[in-house]
Image (cartoon, coloured by chain):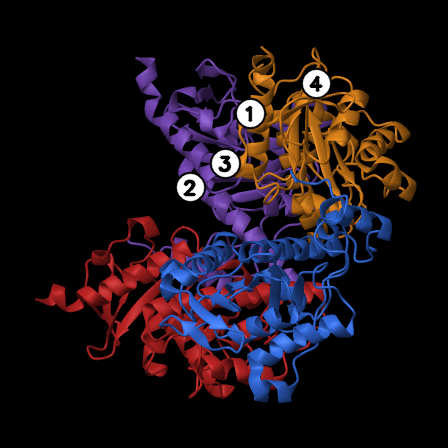
Chain colours: A orange, B blue, C red, D purple
C-alpha cells in the first residue's frame, strides 16, 4: 500500500514543521521543512500556505527529485524546487529547513556572512556562515525556486565550502536555509543559526571591531563535537 | 431581530481583537480592530478602553459610516472615526487593525518609511511602508481621529500608492494601521508589519548602508503570492 | 479585629506584586509594590527578599508613614522608606511600584530622561520622563532609602513637574519608580514606562536625530485620556 | 547503599539544570550545572549532550575532584574538568553553572568586561564582571576544559579579584560561568549575569559614553545585601 510506504517520512516532516513553530523560527505559514528518503529518492514537504496548526502527518506532500508529486492531494510548498536541488547537490543530507527567523533574515538582508565570533558557532561550523549574492534577473524569470537551490549549491562550490562542515546558508535578501542528517536536525540547525546570528549582532553592538575567534579554538570546538575523536555526547 | 443581524460581524471583530493580544501587538487596552460589512455599510469595533480579557462578542459596537452607533451599549474605540474614514476611502477593504507594536511604533516615531530590504516584505507589499507627516495643529483641533483617517488616505493619494498593494501605514509619532480583506487579515497584516519593522531595524544594525532589494525580486515575490499566476497556497 | 482591618489593603498589594512578575518587570525577588490607605495612613508592602511565588496576601507587611511596622511578622521591603517618603510628598497617590525592567534600567543607568517621541508616551504623560541625579554620598551614609524618596520628590520640585501628569521617574544608576491611584495602576504605569523606554530606544536606533512629538499632539493625547473632556474609555 | 549516598546531590544538580532551561539561559542541550558536596569531595553534573527534557535525577553523574566518575552510567558533561578545577580553586563554592545565554555570550565574544553601570549589578558584585583572555593554543592542545578552569582561576588571581564578591566570569570567545553557595544559586547568578549584560548593552545604546556608578553607591548596595549589617531579605 502506497500510503504506508511514506508514512514514516511524512511523520518525520510533520514533526519537523511543527518544531519550526515551537522554536519561534517563523510566524503564521512562513517557513517549511522536508524529510528525504535516499532509498526511494523522494522527500516529504509541507503543503503550501497552510498554517502550522492545521498541519497533519497526512497533509505532507511526497515529491520526487524531478519535482513531481508522487503522493498527496495538496500542492507542496512554493519552495519545493529549492529543496529538490539541494537534495540532488548535497548528497547525503536527509532534511532541509527554511525559516524567516528575524536575526538570520537581518544578516541575509544586509548581505553579510556571519563571522565565527565564538564557540557557539564553532560547535556547529568551522567557517563563517556564507551569504549568497542576489539571485540574477534571468534566474528569477527562468525558474525562481529551482535557481535559488542552484544559487546555494553554486555558492558552496565557488567558495570551496564543505556542506557537512557548514550546514547553513543565508540567501541574500531572502533568509536562511539549513540542512542535516534528518529533518529534525535541519530544524535544529536553523534554530542554531538564528541564535548565532543574534549573538553575532549583539557582539558587534558591544564592540564593532570584534575579531573572529582564533583558528585553533574553532578547530578544537568542531573536533570535540564532530571530529574522529569527538567526546561530546553519549556516543 | 437586530441582534442576530450583526452577530457574525461582531464575532469577527471580537476574534480579531483577541488576536491582537495573542500576537503581542499591544499591551493592556491598547490597539483595536474592526470588521466591515459593505452590504449593511456598518462595522463592528472594540469598545473604548476595555482590556482584551474582558471583551465578549456582545461588547463589540456597531457603527455606521457616518460614525453613528447603530447597535451596542458601550462607547466605541476612541479611534473609531479613523476606521470610518478608511472604510470610506479604501473601497473594498473589510477589516482594519491599529496596534502599538514596538518596532512599528519606533519607525513611526522616527518618521521613517520602511525600505523593502527583503522577500518577507515583498511577499506582502511592493513598495516601502509609507510614514505620514505629523498631523497638523488645525486638524488636531478640528476632529483629531477623523483627520487621522484623512491623513492616511491623503498620504496614499499624494504618493500615488495602491492600498491593495501596501495594506499598512505608519502614522508619524503615533503608530501603525493595517487593513485587509477581513478583520482577521488586517491583524495578520499588523503582525507582518511588526515583523518587517523588526527585521528592517536589525538589518540596519548589521549594515547601516544596506540597499533595498532589486525590483525584479520584489516583483517576483509579490507576483507568486498575489499576481494573476500566483502559485503560493492551495488556491 | 486588626487582621480584618488591613485585609483589603494587603490583598491589593499582593495582587500588584504578582502583576510585576506577570508583566515581566522583574526577575526573582526584584521589585516591589505597595498599596496606600490614606484614611488609616498606612501602606501594605512586599516583604523583603521573598520570591513572587512564595507571596501570600497575609505575607504583606503594614507600615505607617513613620516607617513603623504596624502589622505583620516579616521585614518589609528594603525600599520601604522610599515608598514612605513618596506617600508623604505626593499627596493623593495610593500605590507605588518599583521594578528592575531592563529598558527603564538602561535609561536610568545612562542617566537620560526619556523624550516624548510619540502618542504612546503622551497618552500617559505630558513631559519627558525625568531622571534624577546620582544620590549624594552623604545621603547614602545618612539613610539611603529615605533619601532616595527625597531625591525623587526633590527632582519633581526643582524641575516644577506635576506628579499627577508624570507618574514615573528614573532614579539615576538604579531604576524606575511609578505610582498611581491604586497599587494596580502603579504597576500598570511601571509596565507603560518599560514599553515607552523600549520604544524610545528603538526609535533612536532607527534615527538618532529623532525630534520629540509636537506639543499640540502631546496635549491632544493627554486631554483625550485625562483632560476635563476626556473621551477615552467608558466613563 | 551508594545510590542513596548521592541522592540529594543528584537531585540538587537535576533541579539546577532544569532551571537553566526554565530561565531561558540555553537552548537544546547547551549549558550545564553541577552541585558540590565538600564533605565527600564529589560533585553531581549533567550528562553530556542530553536535552533538558530527558534529564532525570538518576541521570546526573557523580565525579570526584580528580575527574573520575564515581557513580553513574552516562558520560559527564564535556565541561566537567572546568567545574572540577573551579571547585578546587574557589574553595567554599558549592555550585557552578555554565550557559550560552546570548547577551553574556555577546560580551564574551567581544572580549569586554561588563562595567558596573547600576545597582542591579552592584547588588550582586562590587566590580566589573571580568572577561578572560583567549585560551592559548598550547592550553587547547594540552587539556582544553581543564585549562579553561585554570584560565578562570588565573584571571581572578592575576587581577586580584575575590570570587565571593564577583561570582561570575566571561570566558573570551566562549561564554559565561557562574557559581554560588549551591547549584541553585549558581544558576540564579547565571540569570543575573544575563540580565546585567542585557542592561549594560542597552545602556550603551542609550549613551555610549555612560560612566560606571560612583563607588559609594556600589559599596552601599553590596553592603545592604551582603555586608555584615546586611538588611535585605528576612535574615
For the residues beneath circles 4 and 2, the answer to whether they share a chain is no
Residue D218 — which label? none
Q: For the N terminus of chain B, which image quadrant?
A: bottom left
Image x and y of residue D9, in percent: 37, 27
Cα–Cα gap, marks 2 and 3: 9 Å
**Chain at tag 3:** D
Q: Earlier in the sequence, mark 2 or mark 3?
A: 3
The crowding category of the residue bearing disc 1, from other C-alpha atoms within 10 Å (few below 14, some 14 to 19, many at least 20), is some
Image x and y of residue B41, in percent: 53, 69
Q: Is residue C209 visible?
A: no
- Check disc 4 and report its element: helix, strand or loop: strand
Image x and y of residue A180, in percent: 68, 24
Can you identify the residue that label 2 sits on?
D185
For the residues beneath circles 2 and 3, the answer to whether they share a chain is yes
Question: Which of these two is toward me, C16 or B44?
Answer: B44
For the residues beneath circles 3 and 1, the answer to whether they share a chain is no
- Relative placement, left or right, of C30 versus A102 is left
**Chain at tag 2:** D
Can you identify the residue that label 1 sits on?
A58
- Check disc 3 and report its element: helix, strand or loop: strand
**Chain at tag 4:** A
**Count of numbered circles on the image:** 4
Can you identify the residue that label 4 sits on?
A42
Nearer the camera: disc 3 or disc 1: 1
Amino acid at each position: 500500500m502506497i500510503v504506508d510506504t511514506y508514512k514514516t517520512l511524512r511523520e518525520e516532516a510533520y514533526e519537523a514543521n511543527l518544531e519550526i513553530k515551537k522554536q519561534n523560527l517563523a510566524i503564521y505559514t512562513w517557513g517549511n521543512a522536508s524529510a528525504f528518503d535516499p532509498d526511494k529518492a523522494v522527500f516529504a514537504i509541507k503543503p503550501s500556505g497552510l498554517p502550522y496548526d492545521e498541519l497533519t502527518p497526512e497533509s505532507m506532500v511526497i515529491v520526487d527529485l524531478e519535482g513531481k508529486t508522487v503522493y498527496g492531494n495538496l500542492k507542496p510548498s512554493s519552495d519545493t524546487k529549492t529543496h529538490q536541488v539541494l537534495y540532488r547537490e548535497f548528497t547525503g543530507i536527509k532534511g532541509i529547513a527554511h525559516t524567516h527567523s528575524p536575526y538570520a533574515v537581518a544578516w541575509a538582508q544586509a548581505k553579510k556572512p556571519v563571522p565565527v565570533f565564538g564557540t557557539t558557532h564553532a560547535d556547529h561550523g568551522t567557517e563563517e556562515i556564507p551569504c549568497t549574492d542576489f539571485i540574477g534577473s534571468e534566474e528569477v524569470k527562468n525558474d525562481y525556486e529551482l535557481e535559488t537551490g542552484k544559487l546555494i549549491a553554486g555558492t558552496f562550490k565557488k567558495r570551496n565550502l564543505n556542506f557537512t562542515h557548514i550546514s547553513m546558508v543565508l540567501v541574500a535578501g531572502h533568509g536562511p536555509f539549513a540542512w542535516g542528517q534528518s529533518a529534525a536536525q535541519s530544524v535544529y540547525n536553523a534554530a542554531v543559526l538564528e541564535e548565532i546570528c543574534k549573538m553575532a549582532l549583539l557582539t558587534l553592538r558591544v564592540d564593532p571591531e570584534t575579531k573572529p575567534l582564533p583558528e585553533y579554538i574553532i578547530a578544537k570546538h568542531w573536533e570535540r563535537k564532530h571530529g574522529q575523536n569527538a567526546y561530546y555526547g553519549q556516543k
